Every structure is written in C-alpha cells, then in structure tokens.
Amino acid sequence: MAQVERHVRLFRNGRNQALRIPREFELAGNEAILRKEGDRLIVEPIRKGRLLALLGTLEPLDEPWPDVDEDLGSLDSVEL
C-alpha cells in the first residue's frame, strides 16, 4: 500500500494546537486515540463493536457445555 502524504498547516484553537484533517484522511466516528512516539503523533480511530461483529461471524459450537452449577451445593459447608 502506497503511503499518502499531505502538507497541512497547524493553527490555534483557544489554548490548543490543532490541524484540519483533509477529506482523504478522515476517520470514522467522533473520537480517536492520540499518542506520541518520539516526534511523531499517531492518530487512530476508536473502533467500537468489533468484538461483537467478529463473534457474529463464528459458527456455533457443537460441544456440550459443563453444568457450572453442579458443584455449588458443596459450598454450603465452607466457612467464610
């Protein structure tokens, strides 16, 4: 994948430094993660709901699940 670069200008927005993100670099949503690595700023979108989407693509399991309540009766004799 070819790396795309654009020259952008920085400006002040109140006490914050800001930049306009060109249309071809727009991120989905209205939140992002910003981190600094050396003199580089890395901006990453926050992707919500990815786990649920992944789980929805999986086939159902045919394995029987153990009865997790089976041994709970033995807890009555445990002193706390």
Image (tube, rainbow, N blue to C red):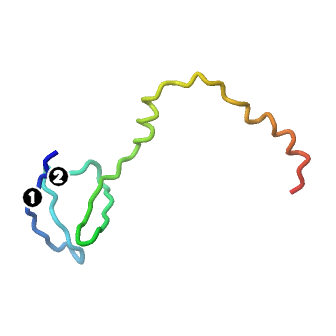
Dots 1, 2 in contact, CB < 8 A: yes
In the picture, measured across the screen, residue 62 lies left or right of residue 46, that is right
**Residue that appears at 24% across and 74% down:** 16
In front of the other: 8 or 64: 64
Say which residue label 2 marks: 25
Q: Secondary structure at mark 2?
A: helix
Identify residue type, mark 2. Answer: Phe
**Residue that appears at 10% across and 68% down:** 9
Q: In the rendered view, tell whether residue 73 sits above or below residue 12.
A: above
Identify residue type, mark 1. Answer: Arg
Say which residue label 1 marks: 6
**Extreme residue toward the top, this view:** 62
Which quadrant of the figure contains the N terminus? top left
**Extreme residue toward the front, this view:** 1
Which quadrant of the figure contains the C terminus? bottom right
* Dot 1 crowding, Cα within 10 Å, few <14, some 14–19, many 20+: few
Residue 43: x and y, percent? 27, 59
Q: Quadrant of residue 31?
A: bottom left
